[in-house]
Image (spheres, rainbow, N blue to C red):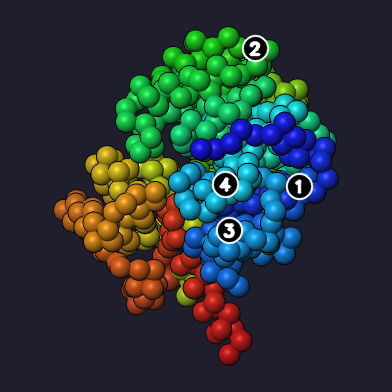
Amino acid sequence: MTPARPASLKDHANGGVARAKYLLLGCQGAGMTALGEILLDAGHLVAGMDQSLVLPFLPPGQKSDKRIHFMPWSGIALTSGPFDVCVISPAVPTDTPIVKQLVREGVPVISLHECLTDVFARHDQLCVAGSHGKSTTSAMLTWILEAAGLSPGFFVGAPQAGFKCSGRQGNDRVAVLESCEYQSSFCHFTPRLAVITGIERDHFDCYPDTNSEDAAFRRFAAGIHPDGCLVFRKECRRTAVIADATNCRTTTFSLYDPTADWFAADIQHKGWRTSFACRHPNNQSIDVDLCAVGRHNVENALAAMATAAAYGVDSHVAAEALSRFPGIQRRFELRGHYHDMTLIDDYAHHPTAITATLTTARTVFPQSRILAVFEPHQMIRTRSLFEEFTRALTLADEVLLLPVFPAREQVTHLECCRLSGELVRELNHNAVKSFLFANLDQVVSRIDHSGIPNDVILTMGAGRTNLIHDQFTRRVQRHSVA
């Protein structure tokens, strides 16, 4: 039902046609926000529609950008067109009435990643894929290239503090693209260089088994330019098998295997920083004082440094840049303090990421009680990895659980509550004090009444848990005014 893209679309995306008008359906997603910023940077007009967008207010947590014309989710609103191109997020079904209306009117309808492919068709694409660490590794690599005197384009799944945006076209013919495996969307890209941070079972709604998951990553790796390079974590056997079948050269990184091309030794945590000795090809070594905490971020830094080196950036430049890396939103982000409690937010929604985040919290706050607020993301993921979620959350002192957030799933709220309730019972059975709450307000009330000074309130999840910090911030502001 989707019409073929017109020949002029690449010219629209790359600035060959002045001021094309884009409609972004599902504009509230992080990826669509980044795309909107990229298109605006290229000089185009952008309108956004989202089913959960209630005008005149923006979605919670979305910054106000007056250059984007936000519209109500209604076919009537389309009369403000005509639009040259409509881009739909993965969360918007192609049989949605508004999409059908656009098709009838002859408006080209393409996916987010198809649009990105057109936008960066003439760029050297440095693509970062993998089950974990994509956003941070992409942001680190972008920061390094900027420090090296380039002005890279980028598409990252979270706003970067250093650029105050998550996407831009850039002024040089190089772009860093966070490359998601969901529905094989990353296979649209044509990487000059690529990173695979590791592969784990994750998107159960589109990959029923490891073979189908590996097949998608295999197609992604097969698209790397023959003169390019694949950078991957040496411990990941699934990636190693894929790397053996590629036609390009490969580079490995590791925290554990000194035979890797890029190896981190003598890792030391100092407050919110991490230092390590980076040994890279030809047995050269350089000291890195990383402005980030956690062993998983050391892996991200190694991947970024290795990729930058493959693109010709001096490793000393990369190390110096990482010492000033300002981070990205929702990645162990310090959100402030409330009644002498420390507020931290993280996007972790997979057991491996939750384990890394809670372990990092223990490292930074060894004497504090860790209260983990978690909203499971997707019923199928929560059921499939139930035991893994249980083990990961036992690293907290107390768990405040919300009903499962059923992204892209047709389930009832009662089913979401029941599954989270099962997880609460299992955690309590494992001697971890856990509670189920119906909504964010109840979580805030619990913290208000049972939190004590020196506690760490760590919110995790891909949904709405970050909004808890906004409530605490508003309370602090009201008290300071009073």
Task: Tell me if residue 97 comes above or below residue 148 in the rendering.
Answer: below
Taking depth in this image into account, of 350 and 73 the one nearest to the observer is 73
Taking depth in this image into account, of 168 and 413 the one nearest to the observer is 413
Q: Quadrant of the C terminus?
A: bottom right
Which one is earlier in the sequence, the residue at label 2 or at label 4?
4
| Amino acid on which disc 2 is placed | Pro
- Quarter of the image where one finds residue 142: top right
- Which residue is drawn at the image coordinates 51% and 15% (left, top)? 243
| Amino acid on which disc 4 is placed | Arg
| Amino acid on which disc 3 is placed | Met
Check disc 2 and report the residue beneath it.
Answer: 226
The answer for how far apart the CA atoms under marks 1 and 3 are is 17 Å
- Mark 3: few, some, or many residues within 10 Å (few <14, many ≥20)? many
- Mark 4: few, some, or many residues within 10 Å (few <14, many ≥20)? few
Check disc 1 and report the residue beneath it.
Answer: 20
Label 1 element class: loop
- Which residue is drawn at the image coordinates 68% and 28% (left, top)? 125
Check disc 4 and report the residue beneath it.
Answer: 104
